[in-house]
Image (cartoon, rainbow, N blue to C red):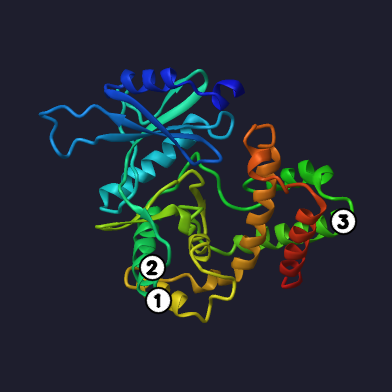
Amino acid sequence: MSKNFYQLEPHLILDCVEKHGFQPTGEIQQLNSYENRVFDIRLENKENTPQNVPQNLIAKFYRPGRWNLETLLDEHQFEIELKNESLQVAAPYILKNNSTADVVNGIHYTFFEKIRGRMIQEFLPNDFLKMGRWMAQLHNIGEAKWAEHRATLGPSADHKWDLLDQMYDHVAVEVRTKYFDAAEKIFSALDEKLNDHKFLRIHGDLHRGNILESPNGFVVVDFDDFVNGPAIQDVWMMMPDQNFKDSVEFENLVKGYEDLRHFPHEQIELIPLLRGYRMISYAGWIMNRWSDPSFPKLFPDFGNYTYWAEECEALTKIAHLI
């Protein structure tokens, strides 16, 4: 199954497209994605094709073993809800099997509409105002229900304590004790503090690389890390640096957000812990993907002493704030 995922053949991809009634030209472009296999597929353009019929679709083949069908459907349902409320997101198509997902060779896949937009090179102060409103809309919809099959953010809820055990032998021995002392302190504090805060459905990975600009406003993509969690998780990842709380950018984001809902000021205390949690999770993610032939090429410095020393220093600084 791993070989099938790492070496998806074009004919298999096109067979899946045709199976669900689309007519591909045969042109396929692989898009950047570390976790999944994502392709931009050109569709036939007939003379009488209406202008509103897409000329491309995005095919996403999910890495086996990460999500089951129910978790994928939770994500797709959320994206459809957002689109129905006029938020610009890439929503999945309903396929001929009356679902948003199908499976081939043990690999789940989905087709998304292709969203036209460009990467934002620089966020201007007014962009944070607009993004604050966008995020508030996202969270208004997110709190309407719970993602029953999706992960809940937090070390205990997300089984990250088990991850620490798996990472132990991979951390450089020179900093191993210091690293895990800091990691365990961060995990314990986050587990405790999260109990005092409200959770809702959030994007979970709302960094700038997942935000496009289109003529109609912002488009948010890649809900692969969609979780139940505190609203502030989507906020801090948007900020340009760690010392953002007195910045014009943050002031504008809060202002835009509060046009539509209460801003969770009480959750700001979680941000350093969430940053540490993400650092540890990211290192564990690379470790668990190392057998993927692309990962040693993408992360050539992972695992050496310098990598772990820098990670340890950053986590220790966070732990000292607790």
Q: In the shown orientation, is residue 51 left or right of residue 125?
A: left
For image coordinates 43% across by 22% down, the residue present is 10
User: Label 3's element?
Assistant: helix
Report the Cα–Cα distance between label 2 and label 1: 7 Å
Report the Cα–Cα distance between label 2 and label 3: 40 Å
Mark 2 surroundings within 10 Å by alpha-carbon count, few (fewer than 14), some (14 through 19), many (20 or more): many
In the figure, 72 relative to 23: above or below?
below
Q: Which residue is mark 1?
A: 252
Whether residue 159 appears in this view of the structure is no
N-term mark: 2 or 1: 2
N-term mark: 3 or 1: 3
In the figure, 154 relative to 316: above or below?
above
Name the spot of residue 249 as percent of width and height, x first.
Answer: 44, 75
Instruction: List the single residue furthest toward the right.
Output: 174
Name the spot of residue 183 as percent of width and height, x first.
Answer: 75, 57
Q: Which residue is mark 2?
A: 132
N-term mark: 2 or 3: 2
User: Label 2's element?
Assistant: helix
Mark 3 surroundings within 10 Å by alpha-carbon count, few (fewer than 14), some (14 through 19), many (20 or more): some
Name the spot of residue 140 as percent of width and height, x first.
Answer: 36, 59
Q: In the shown orientation, is residue 65 left or right of residue 97?
A: right
Mark 1: amino acid: Asn
For image coordinates 62% across by 53% down, the residue present is 154
Q: Which residue is mark 3?
A: 177
For image coordinates 71% across by 57% down, the residue present is 187
